[in-house]
Image: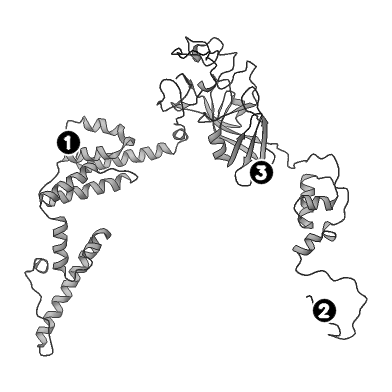
Amino acid sequence: MKYLDGTLQCPPTPDANSSTSAVALYAHWNRQDQLLLNAIFASVSEAVMSLIAMTTTSRDAWQHLARLFASKSRARIMQLKEDLTLIQRGSRTVSEFLHAVKMIADELSLIDAPVSDDDLTLYVLNGLGCEFRDMVAPIRTRETALSFAELHDLLIGHEHYLKRMDGQPSSNLVVTANSSQRRSANPRFKYNKNRFNRYNTGSTKRPSVVCQICDHPGHTAKNCVKLQSSPSANYTSSSTPSKGKWLLDSAASHNITSDLANLSIHSEYDGQDEVVLGDGTGLHIANIGSTAISSSSRSLSLKDALHVPLLHKNLISIHKFTHDNNVVVEFHPFFYLVKDSITGAVLMRGRCEDGVYPVELCPPSSQAHIVSLAGTRASLDHWHHRLGHPSSKLLSSLLRSYNLPVSSSQSPLLSCVSCHCNKSHKLPFSVTSLTSTAPLEYLYADV
């Protein structure tokens, strides 16, 4: 400490007339001082290092640190207390957040303004965020104060519990969507069923409850007598629902089916979430699984599909469908198109029926080869031009893989001028009658 507080002053700088002992004393003092300075540099963070990087002695560095962090001024104390009040965890882990709080509390302790355990616990709980609200109430109601170490262990354990729960399938199911009646903020599965409500005869005052199945006021869809025979969500036709027909729905947050047979892979759902209708009625989720829809070039998956037996309709969430398959959906007055978002190729096309856009569920075929449908046989040259001028080997492979009908076996490369001009490094030699009897008798120049 004698070097840091100035008790042991630096000896005079030796010159040519200085004695050997003076030079040795100066060298010893300078070596010890630089060792202390390097120790201070190594013990501070990068942010603090930039504030003392220009100091040349350990005393200068120590005085800078004292002015920065050990000032007992009222302004410094108020600043630290304000930082402690406003600190938030944000995207940091619990360990990082608690470390930041403890650093501020330690600074206050160094300047004779210590923070009690109760106040420190309150600052930590206020900055944790809503994810830890289950922990806040029990800690606030404790009769005895928690030490910082005990609070640290509790919060770290709860953070590990939340991470473990986030890894389970049910954690991805708590979603929200638009709802036009009561309980719009309920964090359960929702989709807007009031968009197609036909109860609108010109009156500006509507009943408080309108059935989503029969459109009659006075009861909810869960209590409707037509629940077992009439269609429900986003559908106005009275026809019998088709098991293989799905409806594209922009208000559904998840893919939903009423028939478990529509899911190729499924498991029982053991969560507490429900599918919430437009009037606030909740329907039980029995299973969760996935399936696929075949298109012209590839299968389109329906992931995280919910099996809701009481819904009696199969809904495709447009958001999940486009996100999971990297496609876009175009709606037109009489038809719709599903296109690849990268190439723009049309993968699927369907018609508009009764104001909705149904999709026929046709699982992908299990056959090893795809058989194309063609009415006439085309020549190899025709297939070569149609398929983008592939090589003879690739063209033969395509014809065999997709059973394309061919009327001629002549190689297309022999007659394709475009391939000769754009693919060949040099033109093939033509037939000639010239013969040579000695090396270099004839020279050929490809210019």
In the image, taking residue 143 as reference, residue 362 lies left or right, namely right
Q: Amino acid at mark 2?
A: Tyr
Cα–Cα gap, marks 3 and 2: 48 Å
| Residue 131 x %, y % | 34, 36
| Residue 250 x %, y % | 54, 30
**The C terminus, quarter of image:** bottom right
Which one is closest to the eye, mark 1 or mark 2?
2
**Whether residue 442 is situated above or below residue 77 in the rendered picture:** below
| Residue 129 x %, y % | 31, 37
**Residue found at the far left of this picture:** 7
> Which residue does the numbered mark 3 point to in the structure image?
345
Q: Amino acid at mark 1?
A: Ala
Cα–Cα gap, marks 1 and 2: 98 Å
Report crowding for label 3: few under 14, some 14 to 19, many 20 or more residues within 10 A (C-alpha).
some
Can residue 100 be seen here? The reply is yes
First of labels 1, 2 by sequence position? 1
**Whether residue 394 is situated above or below residue 176 in the rendered picture:** below
Can residue 362 be seen here? The reply is no
Give the label on residue 145, or none: 1
| Residue 426 x %, y % | 78, 70
Of 191 and 292, the residue lying toward us? 191
